[in-house]
Image (cartoon, helix red, strand yellow):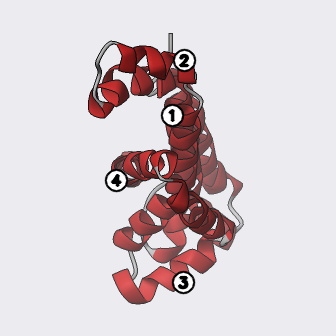
């Protein structure tokens, strides 16, 4: 049980961290450069509509069967909420506040770091929370491609018609989805 839980948490943590590292700069790019907005958000929206098993199937020839394919798919699914919320948070900052920062002599970098990001943090963190919950759910399905995780119990339970095994995977996965609300992104 603990091994599969560890695998599940590992898949989610690695993929969410990489998605944040990619998604935050992409969100800033689309907020700053309107020419990039439509292609980046459009591509992220398209990937979001691909069913997870189909995306796994598309990625298997590139990454093989196992955890790397699952991590790549989880990154793809986590990117949209992070990019979208980063964009929404940055563009939602009141222009008067930006102007006040400029009036104080702030550079663009200082304005971003000291004004825009702190004000947008709540919206950005909401995107990170959504990305985490999506990753917890899709990581469960990743057991179908040999990535491990709590989905192993669910798939074994379905194959053997064993409700206990199904619940042994489903309940901890559901609790992980709920736990992120209390532990990871606590906002005050």
Say the numbered circle drawn on residue 90: 1
Q: Residue at x 63, y 65 (%)?
A: 42
Disc 3: which residue: 57
Disc 4: which residue: 18
Q: From mark 1 to mark 3, how far is it between C-alphas? A: 35 Å
- Comparing 157 with 46, the one in front is 46
Say the numbered circle drawn on residue 80: none
Q: Residues within 10 Å of mark 3 (few under 14, many from 20)?
A: some
The location of residue 13, given as percent across then percent down, is 37, 46
The kind of secondary structure element at disc 3 is helix
The location of residue 188, given as percent across then percent down, is 50, 9
Q: Residues within 10 Å of mark 4 (few under 14, many from 20)?
A: some
Q: Earlier in the sequence, mark 4 or mark 1?
A: 4
Q: Are marks 2 and 4 in contact (CB under 8 Å)?
A: no
- Comparing 34 with 18, the one in front is 34
Q: Are marks 4 and 3 in contact (CB under 8 Å)?
A: no
Disc 2: which residue: 96
Q: From mark 2 to mark 4, how far is it between C-alphas? A: 34 Å
- Comparing 151 with 102, the one in front is 102
Q: Residues within 10 Å of mark 1 (few under 14, many from 20)?
A: many
Residue furthest top in the image: 188
Q: Earlier in the sequence, mark 3 or mark 2?
A: 3
Q: From mark 3 to mark 2, how far is it between C-alphas? A: 48 Å
The kind of secondary structure element at disc 4 is helix
């Amino acid at each position: 049980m603990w091994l599969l839980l560890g695998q599940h948490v590992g898949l989610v943590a690695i993929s969410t961290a990489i998605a944040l590292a990619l998604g935050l700069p992409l969100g800033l790019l689309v907020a700053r450069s309107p020419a990039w907005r439509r292609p980046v958000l459009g591509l992220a929206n398209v990937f979001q509509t691909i069913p997870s098993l189909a995306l796994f199937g598309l990625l298997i020839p590139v990454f093989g069967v196992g955890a790397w394919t699952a991590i790549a798919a989880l990154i793809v699914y986590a990117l949209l909420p992070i990019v979208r919320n980063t964009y929404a948070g940055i563009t939602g900052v009141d222009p008067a506040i930006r102007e006040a920062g400029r009036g104080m002599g702030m550079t663009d970098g200082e304005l971003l770091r000291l004004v825009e990001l702190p004000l947008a943090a709540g919206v950005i963190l909401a995107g990170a929370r959504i990305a985490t919950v999506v990753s917890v759910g899709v990581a469960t399905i990743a057991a179908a491609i040999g990535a491990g995780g709590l989905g192993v119990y669910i798939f074994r339970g379905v194959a053997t018609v064993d409700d206990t095994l199904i619940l042994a995977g489903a309940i901890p996965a559901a609790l992980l989805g709920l736990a992120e609300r209390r532990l990871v992104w606590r906002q005050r």
